[in-house]
């Protein structure tokens, strides 16, 4: 289960009620605190005991690489796949990108196939089974792939674009290393990918007026209406219409008939207050969803231990260094380098710049020093120029 509840899940609370609330066990692979609370609320569970454990996947190395151009990112992906132990999964945000990346891999001689919801069900099933059977080495997929796949020997999961939440990212990279052997999870990150995720998350946005319009159209017909006809009259996308139909079905405002048509369950004037209340909750959900997208960006741009970030996100306390991520490896290397005076300023030390003012040393990236200035924010400066020109001066305390 998760926060995008299917209508079938929503009916479980009624079943539980009809059975006089027997003992219920609700399980989910990954769920942050707000999602766990919503599961309890949706199922109307009483006297609950919540157990959160088992998120630590210490056999999976976690890393993020940042890019400025699409060409550089694609080249890096090809190099990482070349160096990786097979088999593996590459996740993309769109069907088009899945096919593009697959062609790029095939052009380099890799045995790769794409997988997305645009394929017919039999073809998707065939490709999934072929991957499980090692008929090819790399599957390039959208989020349509993976929920019911249990291939134990996946050695890498590379994300060509950022996931839509930390929850989703964890679920996706957790396909790696299920046999307990070492595996690698790498996110290839560009800032513009974050904008794409925001766009995709808002593609099905609905508001109260649109919901009321559905009710008004159904009321005017007074007989069951085909979904295709309803979409035509409303002038909305199929995705948006299905979001609205799902919401209306959740609150009992419509009946979805066996032939696929829909009709109101009662008069429109009685349904509109229910819609307003539902949409108020929907807006709260959208704010939560936006915060989830922000959290995955924070993960990508964080300079703290990646395993610790994920464990703390899911409510499993962890502090210190995991020793199995790029951040911890970089900090260990920088600590060793500082001992040999390779870097002029210790991490977290305070420095001053003539133009940008005071700041704190965040990290070193190859030949650059990254400083978080109090006023202008984060800046990356050439380490060589900083040394030659004396651009930064140390501050006490």
Image: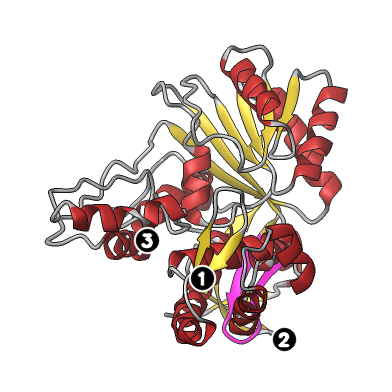
Locate residue 220, reporting x and y percent.
Answer: 66, 79
In primary-sequence order, the first of circles 2 and 1 is 1
Identified at 63% across, 52% down, the residue is 162
Q: Are marks 2 and 1 in contact (CB under 8 Å)?
A: no
In the drawing, what numbered circle is on residue 291? 1
Q: Residues within 10 Å of mark 3 (few under 14, many from 20)?
A: some
User: Mark 1 Cα within 10 Å, few/some/many (few <14, many 20+)?
Assistant: few
Q: Are marks 3 and 1 in contact (CB under 8 Å)?
A: no
Q: Is residue 93 left or right of residue 13?
A: right
Q: Residues within 10 Å of mark 2 (few under 14, many from 20)?
A: few
Residue occupied by mark 3? 35
**Which residue does the image show at 20% across and 55% down from the upper left?**
18
Residue 34: image location, x then y, percent: 36, 66
Occupied quadrant, residue 256: bottom right
- Residue 117: x and y in percent read 69, 40
> How far apart are labels 2 and 1 at the CA level?
34 Å
| Residue in the foreground of this view, choosing between 230 and 311 | 230
Q: Specify the quadrant that holds the C terminus.
A: bottom left
What's the magenta region? Answer: 369-382
Q: Pinpoint residue 146: horizontal percent, then vertical percent.
A: 54, 34
Side (left or right) of 101 relative to 263: right
Q: Is 12 left, or right, of 277 in this rendering?
A: left
The CA span between labels 2 and 3 is 45 Å
Camera-side residue of 116 and 180 = 116
Q: If you read the primary sequence from the N terminus, does the residue marked by circle 3 or circle 1 appear first?
A: 3
In the image shown, does 154 or 95 lie closer to the viewer?
95
Say if 277 sits above or below 8 in the image. Answer: below
Q: Nearer the viewer, mark 2 or mark 1?
A: 1
- Is residue 370 highlighted in magenta? yes
Query: Can I make out residue 86 in this image?
Result: no
Mark whose residue sits in front, 2 or 3? 3
Residue at the spot of label 2:
355
């Amino acid at each position: 289960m998760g926060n995008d509840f299917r209508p079938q899940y929503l009916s479980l609370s009624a079943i539980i009620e009809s059975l006089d609330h027997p003992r219920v066990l609700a399980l989910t692979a990954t769920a942050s605190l707000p999602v766990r609370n919503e599961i309890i609320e949706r199922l109307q569970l009483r006297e609950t005991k919540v157990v959160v454990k088992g998120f630590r996947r210490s056999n999976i190395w976690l890393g993020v690489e940042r890019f400025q151009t699409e060409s550089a990112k694609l080249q890096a992906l090809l190099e990482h796949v070349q160096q990786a132990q097979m088999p593996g999964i590459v996740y993309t945000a769109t069907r088009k990108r899945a096919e593009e990346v697959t062609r790029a891999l095939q052009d380099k001689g890799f045995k790769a196939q794409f997988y997305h919801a645009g394929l017919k069900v039999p073809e998707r099933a065939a490709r999934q089974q072929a991957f499980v059977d090692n008929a090819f080495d790399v599957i390039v997929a959208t989020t349509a792939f993976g929920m019911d796949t249990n291939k134990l020997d996946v050695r890498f999961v590379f994300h060509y674009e950022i996931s839509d939440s930390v929850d989703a990212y964890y679920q996706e990279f957790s396909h790696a290393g299920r046999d307990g052997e070492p595996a690698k999870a790498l996110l290839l990150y560009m800032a513009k990918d974050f904008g794409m995720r925001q766009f995709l998350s808002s593609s099905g946005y609905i508001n109260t007026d649109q919901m009321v319009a559905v009710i008004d159209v159904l009321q005017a017909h007074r007989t069951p209406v085909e979904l295709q006809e309803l979409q035509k009259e409303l002038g909305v996308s199929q995705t948006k219409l299905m979001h609205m139909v799902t919401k209306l079905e959740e609150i009992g405002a419509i009946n979805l008939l066996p032939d696929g048509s829909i009709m109101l369950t009662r008069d429109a004037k009685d349904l509109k207050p229910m819609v307003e209340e539902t949409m108020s909750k929907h807006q709260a959900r959208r704010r939560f969803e936006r915060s989830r997208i922000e959290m995955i960006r924070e993960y990508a741009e964080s300079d703290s231990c990646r395993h610790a970030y994920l464990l703390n996100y899911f409510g499993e306390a962890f502090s210190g260094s995991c020793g199995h991520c790029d951040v911890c490896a970089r900090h260990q290397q920088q600590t060793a380098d500082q001992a040999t005076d390779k870097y002029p300023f210790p991490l977290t030390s305070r420095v001053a710049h003539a133009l940008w003012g005071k700041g704190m040393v965040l990290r070193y990236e190859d030949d650059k020093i990254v400083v978080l200035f109090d006023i202008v924010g984060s800046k990356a400066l050439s380490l060589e120029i900083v040394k030659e020109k004396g651009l930064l001066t140390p501050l006490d305390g």
